[in-house]
Amino acid sequence: MTKKIGILTSGGDCSGLNSVIRDVVFAATQKGWDVVGIFDATDGLFSRPMRYRDLKVADFDFPYAALGGTMLGTNNTGNPHIQKKGDGTTEELTDEQLNERFKAGVQELGISALVVVGGDGSMAIVSKYCKMAGISMIGIPKTIDNDAPGTDMAIGFSTAIGVVTNALDNLTTTATSHNRIMVAEVMGRGAGHLALEAGVAGFADVILIPEVKYTYEGVVNKLKEIQKAGKRFGLVVVAEGVKTPEGKHIFAANGKTFQGVSQYFVEHLQADGFNVRANVLGHIQRAGVPVPGDRLLAARFAVRAIELIDKGENNRVVAYQDGEVTDMDLNAVLKIANTPVDPKGSLVQTAKALGIYIGEVE
Ligand code: F6P
């Protein structure tokens, strides 16, 4: 019997997911295996009728792999209990029903392994269902936040750096025309990787990240310094997870995700006499044509995932460490937890040495 595997994408989307899906299909096809894509993370297995599609090399004649988003859909609500029915209505499922549906679903599809492209939280949840259903789980990390434990780089981060840097370049041209200061708010949840890397690449004057303490006076002093030096614009990059000087996070209307700290700075800087505007870059940071770096990572991760399945491995997560692809046990990954920016790390020091105000760095 031909071996068959499943693949799903879970959590917030990012660019490069379609590249990974493509590469998993291509590498599996080389082994003579079949691949089925599950829609909307695990929801495709929980809902009745199930929602999935067979994936073949020929499906990629259309260049999905070079597009952002995920052709399989995803979700980041974390609540699988409410599921869609065929007639468009929803039903509420118990834990027991979810277990049964998952098991029956993988049996009906005939898959012996599931590739989960997502965060470590999603991998941990899906791995429990897989164990109960008697199939293996292999994880591929993705996130624009780049705080995935165990890997130096996750799918989506390289493209997001490019998108944010491009946005900063664009803000700079309008800022210089108007002799203005732009405050750009960058995603990242509790991590400042994206703000830091794009901020340095985008020639920011100030970069604030959750991992480094700052003072409002430090920001003001830097902006006064550049104005005194005759610079026509100022660029402040602030990670969404930065707390206000009073120690508060600012949340989006959903009350869960961070959003709005840029507005805080604009209000205060305006009151202090600066000509300043806020820009929340938002979900465009999760989009865009995947850059070669993400496609190469996708290719390496997909091939390693297929090799692991071929060897009969279970609960392994592929990773990129010191320029090489490797893999780790899921439990070891879960023990590390998320990886923030190292305040003593080389890029923080580089930023400081360039004269960027990045907070009170030693
Ligand atoms: O984790 C990825 C991420 O894009 C974060 O950077 C951001 O805070 C969050 O997801 C936004 O989530 P949502 O799609 O629910 O608005």
Image (cartoon, grey):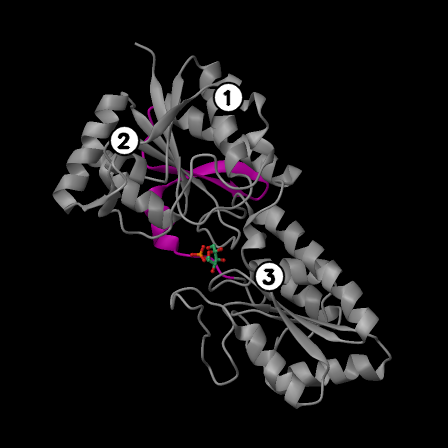
The residue carrying mark 1 is 59
Given the image, on which type of amino acid does mark 1 rest? Asp
Q: Quadrant of residue 107?
A: top left
Residue 50: which disc? 2
The residues bearing labels 2 and 1 have C-alpha atoms spaced at a distance of 20 Å
Q: Is residue 205 visible?
A: yes
Given the image, on which type of amino acid does mark 2 rest? Met
The location of residue 61, given as percent across then percent down, is 57, 21
- Helix or strand or loop: what does disc 1 sit on? helix
The location of residue 47, given as percent across then percent down, is 25, 37
The range drawn in magenta is 312-340
User: Are dots 2 and 1 in contact, CB under 8 Å?
Assistant: no
Q: Is residue 235 left or right of residue 309?
A: right
Pick the residue in front: 28 or 313.
28
In the displayed structure, would residue 298 be above or below residue 11? above
Q: Residue furthest front?
A: 87
The location of residue 19, given as percent across then percent down, is 54, 33
Mark 2: is the Cβ under 8 angstroms from ligand 1? no
Given the image, on which type of amino acid does mark 3 rest? Leu
The residue carrying mark 3 is 281
The location of residue 315, given as percent across then percent down, is 32, 37
Q: Residue furthest bottom?
A: 272
2 or 1: tag closer to the N-terminus:
2
